């Protein structure tokens, strides 16, 4: 990421956070700063060398995202610089992983139940079973809308939901 010096100086990095870059980004949004995507920008990353290192990295990131969500959601929802829609989008960004995990678990259970025996479920139960897929479909449409607004090349649109 590239930051303006005055923003970093004003908001500062919190060394107690595991994902200090995400923390700074959310606090910058809550303070009214605009974060922009530069499609031409390139960045290198040091990848973990083995599976235990990858596990530790992902665990640190997961715990870090949760820390950021707990500490910054009050700032986000108390911010006068953000509209209600933006506040909801930031909340969805911070908690979207639970929606994805919940949909995966629920759909896995649905596949398991149908594999054991075909069930003729009542209409309310079918609606409950379809709800996670509908929410995930809305999230994918929101992702594609964001890709359209950022003028991402169309070749990125189809594989984007795979990384959701």
Image (cartoon, helix red, strand yellow):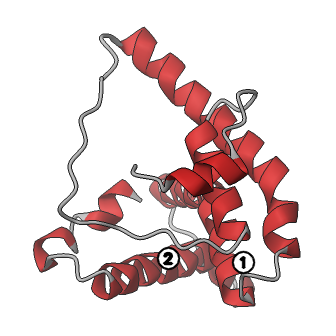
Q: Nearer the viewer, mark 1 or mark 2?
A: 1
Q: Say if residue 101 shows up in the picture.
A: no
Q: To which quarter of the image does residue 110 belong?
A: bottom right
> Crowding near pointer 2: few (<14 within 10 Å), some, many (20+)?
some
Residue 139: mark in rendering = 2
Mark toward the start of the polypeptide (1 vs 2):
1
Q: Which element type, helix, strand or loop, lies under badge 1?
A: helix
Residue 161: mark in rendering = none
Relative horizontal placement of residue 151, taking residue 105 as reference (left or right): left
In the depicted view, which residue is nearer to us: 124 or 14? 14
Q: Residue at x 72, y 36 (%)?
A: 14
Q: Position of residue 55 (x, y in %)?
A: 48, 20
Q: Which element type, helix, strand or loop, lies under badge 2?
A: helix
In the depicted view, which residue is nearer to us: 58 or 123? 58
Q: Position of residue 92 (x, y in %)?
A: 64, 68
Q: Are marks 1 and 2 in contact (CB under 8 Å)?
A: no
Q: Residue at x 65, y 43 (%)?
A: 65
As drawn, 71 above or below 37? above
In the depicted view, which residue is nearer to us: 61 or 114? 61
- Report the residue marked by disc 1: 87
How far is the residue under mark 1 from the one under mark 2? 16 Å
Q: To which quarter of the image does residue 51 belong?
A: top left
């Amino acid at each position: 990421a590239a930051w303006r010096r005055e923003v970093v100086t004003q908001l500062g990095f919190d060394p107690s956070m595991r994902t200090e870059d995400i923390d700074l980004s959310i606090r910058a949004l809550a303070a009214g700063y605009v974060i922009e995507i530069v499609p031409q920008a390139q960045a290198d990353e040091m990848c973990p060398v083995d599976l235990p290192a990858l596990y530790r990295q992902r665990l640190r990131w997961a715990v870090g995202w949760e820390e950021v969500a707990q500490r910054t959601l009050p700032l986000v929802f108390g911010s006068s610089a953000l509209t209600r829609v933006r506040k909801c989008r930031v909340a969805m960004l911070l908690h979207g992983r639970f929606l994805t995990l919940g949909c995966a678990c629920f759909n896995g259970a649905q596949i398991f139940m149908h594999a054991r025996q075909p069930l003729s479920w009542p209409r309310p139960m079918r609606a409950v079973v379809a709800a996670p897929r509908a929410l995930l479909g809305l999230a994918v449409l929101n992702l594609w809308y964001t890709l359209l607004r950022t003028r991402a090349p169309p070749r990125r649109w189809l594989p984007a939901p795979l990384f959701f």
